[in-house]
Image (cartoon, rainbow, N blue to C red):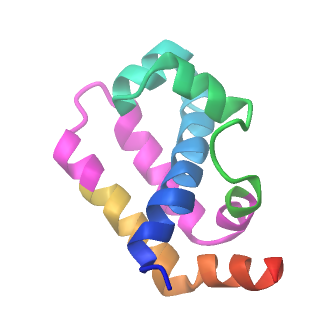
Amino acid sequence: MRPPCEIIVKKGLPAIRALLVKDLIDRHNLSQKQAAKRLGITQAAVSQYLSSIRGDGKLEKELEKAEIFDEIQNLSDKVAAEDSDKSQIINDICDICDLIRKEGTLCKLSAQRH
C-alpha cells in the first residue's frame, strides 16, 4: 500500500506540470525558456512535458474534465504574471494536489486500469 502523497508525486505532480506548461505556452504565449524559468524547471523538461515524454496523458485528460483544470488555469495566470509570488504558487500547487485527492481522481484512474 502506497500513501496518497507518493502517488501524487509520481503521477499527479507531473500531470499538473504538463497542463501548466501547455497552458503557459498556449494561452499566455510564453516561450519554452520563459515557462521553464517561471516554473523553476529546465527548458528540456518543458519540452518533454509538451511532447508527453513526462506526465501521465490519461490523468491529464481526467484533470482537464474536472474542476481542477480551472484551478490549474488560475495558477497559470499567476505564474505568467511578471511579479508572481513563488510561495503562493507552491501553496496553490499543494491545494490542487489536495483537490485531486479529495475528488478521487487518482482512485478513479487506478480503478480503470484494473
Q: Main secondary structure of the magenta part?
A: helix
Q: Is residue 90 left or right of residue 17?
A: left
Q: Residue at x 81, y 77 (%)?
A: 113
Q: Quadrant of residue 5?
A: bottom left
Q: Quadrant of residue 80?
A: top left
Residue 18 in magenta stretch: no
Residue 31 at x, y percent in the picture: 55, 15
Q: Is residue 88 above or below residue 106?
A: above
Q: Is residue 39 visible?
A: yes
Furthest residue toward front? 1
In percent of width and height, residue 96 lies at 42, 65
Q: Is residue 77 magenta?
A: yes
| The image quarter in which residue 77 lies | top left
Q: In this orientation, which residue lies closer to the viewer: 92 or 55? A: 55
Question: x, y (%) of residue 75?
Answer: 41, 49
Residue at the (50%, 17%) spot, across then down: 43
114 lies above or below 60:
below
Residue 26 appears in the figure: no
Span shown in magenta: 61-90
